[in-house]
Image: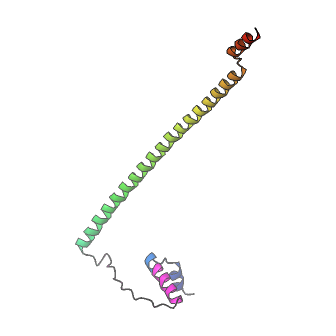
Amino acid sequence: METSDVELENTEIPVKLGLRFAIESRRFANGLDIPEIETKPVPSKEELSVEQLEKRRLRRERNKVAASKCRLKRKAQANKLEQSSNELQAANQDLENLIKDLKKEKSSLESMLNKHECLLNTEVEKTREF
């Protein structure tokens, strides 16, 4: 291999070109026609006018601000959801503790009821004996 071949293998293919190549390869493998795609050459920085460079700079600056704002908003939303989750978990734990306490109280009341001898029944039985 020559040095130029090695350089070509080590260079990354832009995503658009890679996708275009994949689509064209599949179409060719399936026997379909490969559509001709018109490409506009992107002017290099040397070819851009001062006005175009300023537009690009402003667009990038606006995008930077918008991206930062989006990241902050996403972070705030994540914090809000985490706080809400923590509050719901705490409320759930409180309810589970309440259920446990009520079950204990129920079982103690049932055991008290089972141990209790009804005085009314014993009095009725005494009156029947006479």
Q: Is residue 105 left or right of residue 92?
A: right
Q: Could you say where residue 65 lies in the image, as x and y percent from the top left? A: 33, 58
Residue 129 sits above or below residue 32 on the image: above
* Residue sitting farthest toward the left: 51
| Numbered marks: total | 0
Q: Could you say where residue 59 lies in the image, as x and y percent from the top left? A: 29, 65
Residue 57 sits above or below residue 6 on the image: above
* Residue sitting farthest toward the top: 130
Specify the segment rendered in magenta: 18-46
Front position in the image: 126 or 20: 126
Q: Could you say where residue 124 lies in the image, as x and y percent from the top left? A: 70, 13
Which residue is at 45% across, 75% downward? 15
Residue 124 sits above or below residue 29 on the image: above
Is residue 39 one of those drawn in magenta? yes
Residue 63 sits above or below residue 117 on the image: below
Which residue is at 48% across, 82% downward? 23
Which residue is at 69% across, 14% downward? 119
Please identify the quadrant where the N terminus is shown.
bottom right
